[in-house]
Structures are given as structure tokens and as C-alpha cells.
């Protein structure tokens, strides 16, 4: 009889234990791995090591490439910006370019870029825009642009 009580108590203890959370507490899609991604016509593109430069005129340039598609973002007065800064990309001069299959889409029609975080050496944010090429005036639309922890 003691064995049955012991067995019942053991089962009760194991059943009443709360399941341990096995997810990584620090994994909120913010694992500090640099990433830069965007979509064109539903196709996904990624560059985990974009080239970033801030020149002596305070202009930030981000160049990302995925095979035959290149994206360039140009941000003026970079050091005056802070977390949450929202920048219109369709001002003069154009600030967002795409090169796709050898065609240069350099005339930015609309779009914006938002910096969610500007750290001492890393940037995170999102962007979208539409640019057109200047021969046949065909457009390309970049959507779902996201960059995270890219180093400058």
C-alpha cells in the first residue's frame, strides 16, 4: 500500500510541475547578427554584409547587393538623426536607387526610411521606395526593406 501512495505522490509531483520555457530569452529577432533584406515583385533579396560609408560631408551611403540586384540608400545630414528618424527618400537629389539586371533605376519617385536604432556603430531600421529608370521610365518597387545591426 505504501508503494501505491509513493507512486501516486510521484506522479502527482511530475504532473503538477510547470513546463520549463526552452526558448532563448534573448531571441526576440534581435540576435545582433547583421542583416539587410528587401523585396522586389515578391522576390526576396538579402545582403548580410552591406557596404556602409559616412563621408566627410555627413552623407551616409548603404550599398547592398544580392546577385543581379543592387540597392543604394543615400542619407544626408546623417549625424543629425536619432532613433525613430523618418526620412523621405523622394527629395532632390534622389536618395534610393536600384540596379536590376543591368538596368539603373535612379529616379526615386516615393518612399521612406525609418531608423529604429542609431547606435555608436550599428544601424537598424526599415525602408520602402519606388524608383524608375530614365530611358523608358519603367519603375521598380522595393518593399519590406529591413536592416538590423549593420555596422558603420
Image (cartoon, grey):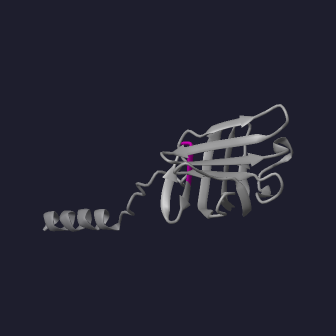
Q: Nearer the viewer, residue 127 or 116?
A: 127
| Residue at x 30%, y 67% (from the top left corner) | 15
Question: Where is residue 124 drawn, in percent x and y?
Answer: 66, 49
Quarter containing the C terminus: top right
Q: Is residue 101 in the magenta section?
A: no
Q: Is residue 29 left or right of residue 98?
A: left
> Relative to 7, is 23 above or below?
above
Q: Is residue 98 left or right of residue 111?
A: left
- Quarter of the image for residue 32 reads top right
Question: Where is residue 38 drawn, in percent x and y?
Answer: 56, 56
- Quarter of the image for residue 18 reads bottom left
Count how many numbered circles sit on residues in the image.
Answer: 0
Can the viewer see residue 112 in this picture?
Answer: no
Question: Where is residue 99 drawn, in percent x and y?
Answer: 59, 50
Q: Is residue 49 left or right of residue 151?
A: left
Q: Nearer the viewer, residue 118 or 97?
A: 97
| Residue at x 77%, y 52% (from the top left corner) | 83
- Quarter of the image for residue 22 reads bottom left
The span shown in magenta is: 33-37
| Residue at x 66%, y 58% (from the top left corner) | 135
Q: Main secondary structure of the magenta part?
A: strand
Question: Where is residue 60 drawn, in percent x and y?
Answer: 75, 41
Amino acid at each position: 500500500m505504501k508503494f501505491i501512495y509513493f507512486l501516486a505522490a510521484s506522479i502527482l509531483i511530475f504532473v503538477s510541475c510547470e513546463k520549463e520555457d526552452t526558448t532563448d530569452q534573448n531571441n526576440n529577432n534581435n540576435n545582433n547578427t547583421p542583416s539587410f533584406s528587401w523585396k522586389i515583385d515578391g522576390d526576396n533579396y538579402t545582403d548580410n554584409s552591406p557596404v556602409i560609408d559616412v563621408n566627410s560631408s555627413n552623407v551616409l551611403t548603404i550599398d547592398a547587393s544580392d546577385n543581379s540586384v543592387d540597392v543604394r540608400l543615400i542619407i544626408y545630414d546623417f549625424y543629425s538623426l536619432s532613433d525613430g528618424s523618418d526620412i523621405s527618400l523622394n527629395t532632390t537629389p534622389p536618395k534610393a536607387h536600384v540596379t536590376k539586371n543591368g538596368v539603373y533605376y535612379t529616379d526615386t519617385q516615393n518612399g521612406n526610411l525609418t531608423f529604429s536604432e542609431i547606435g555608436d556603430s550599428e544601424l537598424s531600421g526599415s525602408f520602402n521606395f519606388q524608383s524608375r529608370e530614365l530611358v523608358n521610365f519603367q519603375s521598380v518597387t522595393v518593399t519590406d526593406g529591413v536592416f538590423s545591426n549593420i555596422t558603420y
